[in-house]
Image: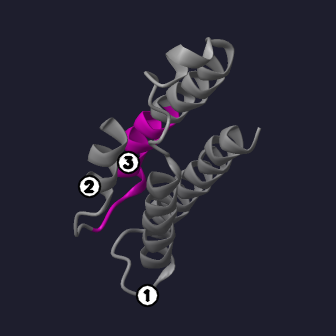
Amino acid sequence: MALRALEAELSESHQWSAGELTPLMDRLNSLTRRVVDLRLFREIVPEEARRMIDTTESPRPAITLLAERIAEARHRTTGDAYQGTETERRAELIRLDDLSRRLAEIAGLLAG
């Protein structure tokens, strides 16, 4: 349920900045770790108990949406229409790069 709420928030029509995306990344990180832990827990409980543990919710759609929002923010920041100073542009690009690295780490949790 929390992942769907995050997806809904990321689907809003908005020009996201790195500062606005950072708390969403934090939420996605926490929720993804919970999903991974739940899947591991489900594997160690008896078969009859497994049916009571829902592991169908995947963070992958939220990961995809967040990647899209980061790419859009990067495109706006590198474009001619960017209204900040060159120093602000560089700082925003550094923050967006950091978000991209964090997102790759989160996605890696699902592969392992």
Quadrant for the N terminus in the image? top left
| Disc 1: CA contacts within 10 A as few (<14), some (14-19) or many (>=20) | few
Q: Is residue 66 above or below residue 98?
A: below
Q: Main secondary structure of the magenta part?
A: helix
Q: Is residue 47 above or below residue 94?
A: above
Q: Residue 8, labelled with which disc?
A: 2
- Asked if residue 13 lies in the magenta stretch, the reply is no
Q: Nearer the viewer, mark 3 or mark 2?
A: 2
Q: Residue at x 62, y 42 (%)?
A: 106
Amino acid bearing label 3: Gly
Residue farthest along the right direction in this orientation: 112
Residue 32 percent location from the top left of the image: 53, 35
As measured in the structure, the alpha-carbon distance from the residue carrying label 3 to the one carrying label 1 is 21 Å
Amino acid bearing label 1: Asp
Q: Which residues fall within the magenta stretch?
A: 15-29
Q: Residue 80, labelled with which disc?
A: 1
| Disc 2: CA contacts within 10 A as few (<14), some (14-19) or many (>=20) | few
**Left or right: 7 as drawn, with respect to 92:** left
Q: Residue at x 49, y 46 (%)?
A: 59
- Pick the front one: 73 or 27: 27
As measured in the structure, the alpha-carbon distance from the residue carrying label 2 to the one carrying label 1 is 30 Å
**Left or right: 37 as drawn, with respect to 77:** right
Residue at image mark 3: 19
Q: Nearer the viewer, mark 2 or mark 1?
A: 2
